[in-house]
Amino acid sequence: DVKVTQSSRYLVKRTGEKVFLECVQDMDHENMFWYRQDPGLGLRLIYFSYDVKMKEKGDIPEGYSVSREKKERFSLILESASTNQTSMYLCASSQGGGWGTEAFFGQGTRLTVV
Amino acid sequence: KNQVEQSPQSLIILEGKNCTLQCNYTVSPFSNLRWYKQDTGRGPVSLTIMTFSENTKSNGRYTATLDADTKQSSLHITASQLSDSASYICVVIMYNNNDMRFGAGTRLTVKP
């Protein structure tokens, strides 16, 4: 089975802190994604990557950056956390050949910025 | 405006009853549509995928339908169980760039 693992289930950070969210997948997938999920809004794409060292902005990249130094690992970085970044963050991966292939999700990280 | 609208936002039913969740989309051009189940505190897991040419697909007690002309999909759950309590998310994949568009989900609660 595909496994997508996010480093933390729950995080509490202070405003202005630099925050790292880590995601690792074990199925050699090319594509990796970071989403945030807020009530009533659904999942919104922050950044995605289709190869090592490659990254593309999604719908809401402001305030975030990403890093993909190795194929299996995709990190989301909040340079200076703000309260409006309090959310559930979901990482996903999928095989190459288009996003129409199934995306496998991690268990999510519930981030609270105080 | 979200291009994928789901209804109802939430639903409570008794164990053993059937229910139907709706998904309307304006995404175009359309490639395929997936229904995901998300248990509380977990990531979404794919239930079924509907391609342009498919009208109905079943996966156990789950039956998905698709009308590409009216841009509507439904997920019917038969003989509901307590373990069906979850959020159900409709995801539409665009044809040109395979972008995924997520609905906000329907929160289903099955009570004994």
Image: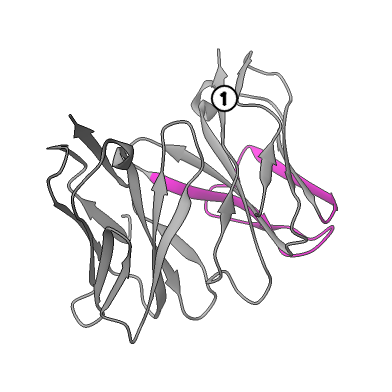
Magenta-span inclusion, residue A44 = yes
The answer to whether A29 is drawn above or below residue B19 in the figure is: below
Residue nearest the observer in this picture, A71 or B19: B19
Magenta-span inclusion, residue A47 = yes
Name the residue located 65 percent from the left edge and 77 percent from the top edge: A97
Quadrant into which the N terminus of chain A falls = bottom right
The answer to whether A14 is drawn above or below residue B6 in the figure is: above
Residue A114 position, x and y percent, is: 55, 12
The answer to whether B68 is drawn above or below residue B103 in the figure is: below
Q: Amino acid at mark 1?
A: Leu
Give left or right: position of B25 versus A28.
left
| Residue B104 visible somewhere in the drawing | no
Q: Quadrant of residue B74?
A: bottom left
Residue A38 position, x and y percent, is: 41, 36
Residue nearest the observer in this picture, B111 or B25: B111
Give left or right: position of A73 versus B29.
right
Asked which colour scheme the image uses, the reply is one colour
| SS label for mark 1 | strand
Residue nearest the observer in this picture, B108 or A112: B108
Please state the chain letter of the residue tagged with numbered disc 1 in the rendered image: A
Residue at which label 1 appears: A111
Residue B48 position, x and y percent, is: 40, 65
Residue nearest the observer in this picture, A49 or B34: B34
Q: Which span is picked out in magenta?
A: A42-71
